[in-house]
């Protein structure tokens, strides 16, 4: 009787799994089909080929694009983790009116659509001479990633006992010493969560990269692959192959950090 009552739960889980698997099936299927094959996207390729991967790699200069993605993502995520953790510690430990106001303003930025400020931001970057530069792309990503980062870190630090701070003060440590020697090591689960969430967001960014990184030498993977789709022609098979190549680095990072991911999300978001 108990198993009978649980079948709707398994049916829902199966449906969710199928919905998530279908895009990957189509992506892999398309990446191995030759452009001359016009069969349905649901059918297996008649002559599976690696040519799409070779063409996407060469025509989109994916080696250079992957380097650009790695440099921008690693730099931006490192800054987000350092600035976000440092900003969240006093916001969580000293909940004064001013700190609550700062926290509320920071979290409120989450509901501001990035596209609403794209034009003034573009003009600002042009005035600073930041078009086609790494620093402009990195600082833009950091700015838009900080609100969620502060939200997660503040919620997690609230779960860390304040007695640890008091013990550190009794031992003669400064506030910065307490943060770096006691608090920061305890933030490993939420740091892993921030790295995964913000890393994926920055790695896949297209809306800012297409405006700020226009030269081929600084283009990221999404921008480099967009050249295969135009008004008069498209190479969807090359795009599919390029997407599979481009997703590999982040998939490896996720597999390495997945054991911390769920714990960090639960402690940082739910308890916060």
Image (tube, rainbow, N blue to C red):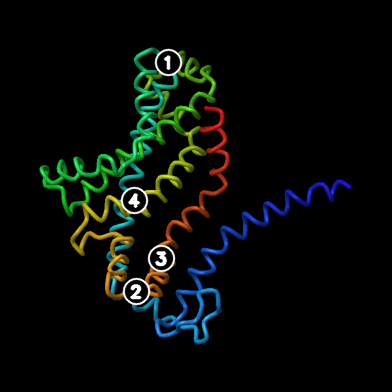
Q: Tell which tag, 1 or 3, sits nearer the viewer.
A: 3
Q: Which label sits on residue 243? A: 3
Q: Earlier in the sequence, mark 4 or mark 1?
A: 4
Q: Name the residue tied to disc 4.
A: 73
Residue 253's place in the image compared with 162, above or below, is below
Q: Earlier in the sequence, mark 2 or mark 4?
A: 2
Crowding at mark 1 (Cα within 10 Å: few <14, some 14-19, many 20+): few
Residue that sits furthest to the front in the current view: 231
Tag on residue 174?
Answer: none
Q: Looking at the image, is mark 2 or mark 4 nearer the viewer? A: 2
Q: Which disc, if any, is residue 56?
A: 2
Q: Position of residue 65 (x, y in %)?
A: 29, 63
Nearer-N-terminus badge (1/3): 1
Nearest-to-viewer mark from 4 and 3? 3
Separation (CA) of disc 3 from disc 2: 9 Å
Tell which circle, 3 or 2, labels the residue nearer the N-terminal end. 2
């Amino acid at each position: 009787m108990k198993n009978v009552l649980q079948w709707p739960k398994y049916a829902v889980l199966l449906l969710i799994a199928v919905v998530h698997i279908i895009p990957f099936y189509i992506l892999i299927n398309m990446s191995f089909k030759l452009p001359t094959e016009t069969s349905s996207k649901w059918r297996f390729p008649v002559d599976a080929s690696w040519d799409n991967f070779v063409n996407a790699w060469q025509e989109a200069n994916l080696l250079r694009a992957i380097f650009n993605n790695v440099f921008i993502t690693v730099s931006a995520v490192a800054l987000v983790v350092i600035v976000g953790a440092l900003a969240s510690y006093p916001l969580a430990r000293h909940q004064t009116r001013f700190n609550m106001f700062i926290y509320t303003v920071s979290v409120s930025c989450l509901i501001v659509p990035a596209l609403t400020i794209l034009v003034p931001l573009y003009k600002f970057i042009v005035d600073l001479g930041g078009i086609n530069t790494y620093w402009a792309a990195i600082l833009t990503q950091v700015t838009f990633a900080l609100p969620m980062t502060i939200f997660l870190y503040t919620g997690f630090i609230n779960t860390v006992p304040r007695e640890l701070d008091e013990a550190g003060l009794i031992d003669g440590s400064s506030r910065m010493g307490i943060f770096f020697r006691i608090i920061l090591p305890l933030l490993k689960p939420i740091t892993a969560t921030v790295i995964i969430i913000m890393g994926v967001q920055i790695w896949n960014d297209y809306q800012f990269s297409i405006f700020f990184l226009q030269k081929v030498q600084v283009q990221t993977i999404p921008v480099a692959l967009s050249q295969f789709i135009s008004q008069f022609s498209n190479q969807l098979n090359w795009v599919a192959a390029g997407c599979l190549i481009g997703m590999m680095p982040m998939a490896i990072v996720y597999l390495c950090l997945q054991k911390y991911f769920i714990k960090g999300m639960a402690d940082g978001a739910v308890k916060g």
